[in-house]
């Protein structure tokens, strides 16, 4: 099939790479906000496994052309117009669709892969013109850090479609990724758009609820890990998204939550629950700072803090709405120097905060960030942080304090190395401190 992909989001890059990889003729038009040369330098795209290599392969084989690059544009009409724009680009989407519809005659299916307000796919269909032109909603379900795997080996595709011919076209387009079993779940367009937002809301609610329980466990002297295991063993609940932590972030998760809040407000149905979820998450972004404040009884000025992790999740170079931003503001307000290590996100952090006098960034040896530090905060659970050299770490941290924002360490094991451990609803003191009480 022949298609034109619009957008500079991860969803657009992945669709262009994957669909050209299986033989479709794809012309990719990056958004003017991030044209092709800027995309090739974007750290978040360069670190996404397989995407750049597959884009290069598609261009070499002639199944992919890219606007703004040195490849000649695909000519002739198209079968599919694929839209993967950011919510901020919604205002120009209608004009974009109208221009593309005029340029390409004949039948056309618009696949709206953008996270727009409920009902937007229907509004975009009205801009196509012609009875043989239909719009469907294909919900963006990619996971950053494994976008290629999410697209090429999907657990499901959520398709909002009210037309059988359009449904057949989409299934043909995705046939290479839908062979083992039928992973396409079809429903009306508005239902699909709302399902995406409702799913994000449910996941965020689970996380925030578990964070509330972790706070209660802290107050009662209970290890929240026992509570998590007990809850997860209940078949009505399960283990997914029950991990307490120091807050969630990310460009998609956070903005989809805000989009759900906007939908609620526009419908005149205020959601007290969603407001609480958002409030809890913002509070949790300060939880490591509050633990630090308590440990040192508010005497923080002049101290040096090591931080491992800045990205909003492992495998990403992005810091959009990441907990580390709130944490840094709180630390700097108290005059705390920060030595931060992250294997991928230091360029994004430097672009966000500039050359702050209280910040030193490291992307090589994580132990370099711990030299001369009073304590260590674990913010992003990159895999190479999971099993540190405990003897080395204990020798580096002057106050021997570890604040685990993701509960990835065993409290008793950490304490056995002479470190004071404080997690989210978990804690342990070194044997000498316990015996002196």
Image: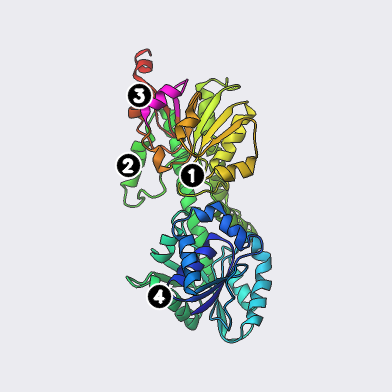
Helix, strand or loop at label 1? It is helix
Instruction: Report crowding for label 3: few under 14, some 14 to 19, many 20 or more residues within 10 A (C-alpha).
Output: some
- Numbered range of the magenta stretch: 389-402
Q: Secondary structure at mark 2?
A: helix
- Identify the secondary structure beneath mark 4: helix
Going from the N terminus, do you reach mark 3 or mark 4 first?
4
Between residues 357 and 434, which one lies in front from this camera angle? 357
User: How many angstroms separate mark 2 from mark 4 (CA)?
Assistant: 41 Å
Assess whether residue 416 is covered by the magenta stretch: no
Q: Residue 85 falls in which quadrant of the image?
A: bottom right
Which of the two discs, 3 and 2, labels the residue nearer the N terminus? 2
Query: Cα distance, mark 3 to mark 2?
Result: 28 Å
Question: Which residue is denoted by mark 2 in the rendering?
Answer: 230
The location of residue 207, given as percent across then percent down, is 46, 46
Q: CA distance from mark 3 to mark 4?
A: 54 Å
The answer to if 392 sits in the magenta stretch is yes
In the picture of the structure, the residue carrying the numbered disc 4 is 175
* Of the image marks 4 and 1, the number of the one nearer the N terminus: 4
Q: Is residue 191 left or right of residue 413?
A: right
Whether 335 is drawn above or below 131: the answer is above
Question: What residue did someone put label 1 on?
Answer: 208
Q: Nearer the viewer, mark 3 or mark 2?
A: 3
For disc 3, the marked residue is 417
Front tag of 4 and 1? 4
Query: Which residue is depicted at the point 39% across and 43% down?
Result: 383
Q: Residue at x 64, y 82 (%)?
A: 129
């Amino acid at each position: 099939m022949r298609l034109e992909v619009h957008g500079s989001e991860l969803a657009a890059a992945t669709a262009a790479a994957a669909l050209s990889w299986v033989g479709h003729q794809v012309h990719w038009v990056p958004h003017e906000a991030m044209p092709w040369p800027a995309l090739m330098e974007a750290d978040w795209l360069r670190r996404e496994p397989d995407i750049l290599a597959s884009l290069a392969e598609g261009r070499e084989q002639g199944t992919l052309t890219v606007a703004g690059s040195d490849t000649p544009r695909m000519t002739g009409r198209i079968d599919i117009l694929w839209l993967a724009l950011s919510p901020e680009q919604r205002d120009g989407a209608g004009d974009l669709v109208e221009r593309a519809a005029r340029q390409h005659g004949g039948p056309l299916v618009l696949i709206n892969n953008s996270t727009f307000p409920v009902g937007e796919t229907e509004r975009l269909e009205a801009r196509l013109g012609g009875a043989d032109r239909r719009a469907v909603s294909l919900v963006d379900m990619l996971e950053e850090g494994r976008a290629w795997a999410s697209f090429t080996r999907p657990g499901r595709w959520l398709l909002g479609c009210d037309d059988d011919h359009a449904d057949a076209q989409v299934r043909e387009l995705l046939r290479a990724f839908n062979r083992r079993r039928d992973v396409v779940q079809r429903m009306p367009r508005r239902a699909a758009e709302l399902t995406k937002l409702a799913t994000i809301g449910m996941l965020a609610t689970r996380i925030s609820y578990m964070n509330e329980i972790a706070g209660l466990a802290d107050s009662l002297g209970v290890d929240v890990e026992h509570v998590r295991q007990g809850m997860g063993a209940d078949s009505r609940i399960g283990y997914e998204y029950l991990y307490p932590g120091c807050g969630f972030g990310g460009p998609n998760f956070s903005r989809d939550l805000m989009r759900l809040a906007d939908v609620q407000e526009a419908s005149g149905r205020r959601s007290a629950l969603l407001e609480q979820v958002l409030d809890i998450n913002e509070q949790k972004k300060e939880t490591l700072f509050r633990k630090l404040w308590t440990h040192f009884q508010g005497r923080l000025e002049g101290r040096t803090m090591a931080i491992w992790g800045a990205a909003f999740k492992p495998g990403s170079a992005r810091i959009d709405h990441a907990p580390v931003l709130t944490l840094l503001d709180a630390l700097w307000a108290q005059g705390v120097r920060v030595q931060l290590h992250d294997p991928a996100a230091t360029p994004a952090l430097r672009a966000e905060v500039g050359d702050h006098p209280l910040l030193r960034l490291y992307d090589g040896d994580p132990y370099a960030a711990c030299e001369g530090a009073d304590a260590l905060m674990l913010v992003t659970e990159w895999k190479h942080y999971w099993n540190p050299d405990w003897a080395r770490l204990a020798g580096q941290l002057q106050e021997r304090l570890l604040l685990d924002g993701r509960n990835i360490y065993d409290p008793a094991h950490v304490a056995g190395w002479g470190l004071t451990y404080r997690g989210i609803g978990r804690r342990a003191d070194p044997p000498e401190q316990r015996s002196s009480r």
